[in-house]
Image (tube, grey):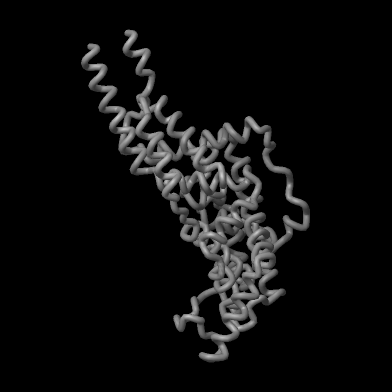
């Protein structure tokens, strides 16, 4: 049994909880809080959805004109210190 | 030796070009999330830097990740060059802001039985991108690298040359600000009015709780869960 924590303290730890980055003692305290606090269980589910939003709804497409310009840059790439190696 | 040198260089060049072409969409996406309109320029600089460092890449299988790390490093250096300071503390109002509670209190989607999920569901990919761009650079970078790109906090710290504790603080502030800006964006863009109106019509057509497209409502985050 760990010291009880407030809802505010619990909410501040939710992302760390989902990221598996909490210290064991903090994790235990949060587990015990979630066992009786339905509101914070709702916050936990919401935090999970927010993480999913960031992971899945942030795709960015590469515009055709930018792709053409960047591929031209790639075509012109020279690896490393080529000149220096030729000098050797 | 000179002949061998030329062969190695040609092979390296081809390998780097292949890697860069293959990773270009992903690299650009990361650059756009980090730097917004500077994305193309950021990718260019990252490619040039990758060129200089390619000899040091021992494991070419690690190439995609290596390129993303280089791009994040370039972005870090640009921020430093501009003298942007790591984050100020959030003002108390922002520190205390809870999107979860705000949604319950404001009830922007009165026809929804799954308010929180439906609120997030109203955001398109472009909307989420625009919300992220509202965050300060130093808060957006850790958030993008951690939650969009999937690097862990230690890796993010190494990429941004920050102590891990600082990254954790910036992630905390970034999440708070992201929630706050989701709400502000929804209010300012009329997103909620459009969604609420749409849902209202659907509820009228299909009964309360129905989705506009007739699909079952997502489960798990209704007000009943709080």
Drawn side of residue B123 relative to residue B87, left or right: left
Q: Is residue A88 above or below residue A36?
A: above
Q: Is residue B180 above or below residue B150?
A: below
Residue B181 seen in the figure: yes
Quarter occupied by residue B166 = top right
Q: Position of residue A79 (x, y in %)?
A: 35, 25
Q: As drawn, which residue projects farthest toward the right?
A: B92
Q: Residue at x 47, y 35 (%)?
A: B44
**Quadrant where the image shows the C terminus of chain B:** bottom right
> Residue A9 versus residue B149: which sits nearer the camera?
B149
Q: Residue at x 59, y 35 (%)?
A: B162
Drawn side of residue B158 relative to residue A85, left or right: right
Q: Position of residue B46 (x, y in %)?
A: 47, 34
Image mark count: 0
Q: Is residue B120 above or below residue B4?
A: below
Q: As drawn, which residue projects farthest toward the top?
A: A88
> Residue B197 versus residue B66: which sits nearer the camera?
B197
Q: Residue at x 33, y 29 (%)?
A: B58
Residue A10 seen in the figure: no
**Quadrant where the image shows the N terminus of chain B:** top left
Q: Position of residue B191 (x, y in %)?
A: 62, 70
Quarter occupied by residue B20 = top left
Q: Residue at x 43, y 40 (%)?
A: A69
Q: Position of residue B81 (x, y in %)?
A: 63, 30
> Residue B59 versus residue B121: which sits nearer the camera?
B121
């Amino acid at each position: 049994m760990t010291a009880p924590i407030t809802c505010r303290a619990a909410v501040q730890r939710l992302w760390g909880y989902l990221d598996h980055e909490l210290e064991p003692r903090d994790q235990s305290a949060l587990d015990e809080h979630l066992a009786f606090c339905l509101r914070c269980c709702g916050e936990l589910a919401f935090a999970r959805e927010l993480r999913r939003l960031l992971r899945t709804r942030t795709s960015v497409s590469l515009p055709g004109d930018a792709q053409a310009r960047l591929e031209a840059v790639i075509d012109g790439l020279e690896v490393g210190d080529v000149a220096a190696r030729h000098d050797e | 030796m000179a002949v061998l040198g030329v062969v190695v260089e040609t092979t390296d060049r081809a390998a780097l070009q292949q890697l860069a072409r293959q990773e270009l969409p992903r690299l650009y996406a990361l650059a756009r999330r980090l730097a917004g309109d500077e994305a193309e320029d950021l990718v260019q600089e990252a490619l040039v830097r990758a060129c200089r460092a390619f000899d040091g890449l021992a494991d070419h299988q690690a190439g995609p990740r290596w390129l993303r790390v280089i791009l994040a490093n370039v972005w870090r250096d640009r921020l430093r060059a501009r003298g942007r300071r790591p984050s100020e503390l959030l003002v108390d109002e922002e520190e205390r802001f809870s999107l979860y509670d705000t949604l319950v209190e404001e009830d922007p989607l009165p026809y929804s039985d799954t308010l929180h999920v439906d609120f997030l569901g109203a955001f398109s990919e472009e909307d989420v991108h625009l919300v992220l761009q509202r965050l300060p650079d130093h808060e957006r970078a850790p958030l993008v690298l951690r939650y969009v790109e999937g690097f862990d906090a230690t890796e993010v710290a190494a990429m941004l040359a920050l102590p891990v504790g600082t990254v954790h603080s910036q992630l905390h502030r970034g999440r708070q600000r992201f929630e706050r800006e989701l709400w502000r964006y929804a209010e300012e863009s009329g997103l909620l009015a459009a969604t609420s109106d749409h849902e209202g019509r659907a509820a009228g057509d299909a009964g309360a709780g129905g989705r506009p497209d007739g699909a079952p409502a997502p489960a798990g985050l209704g007000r009943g869960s709080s």
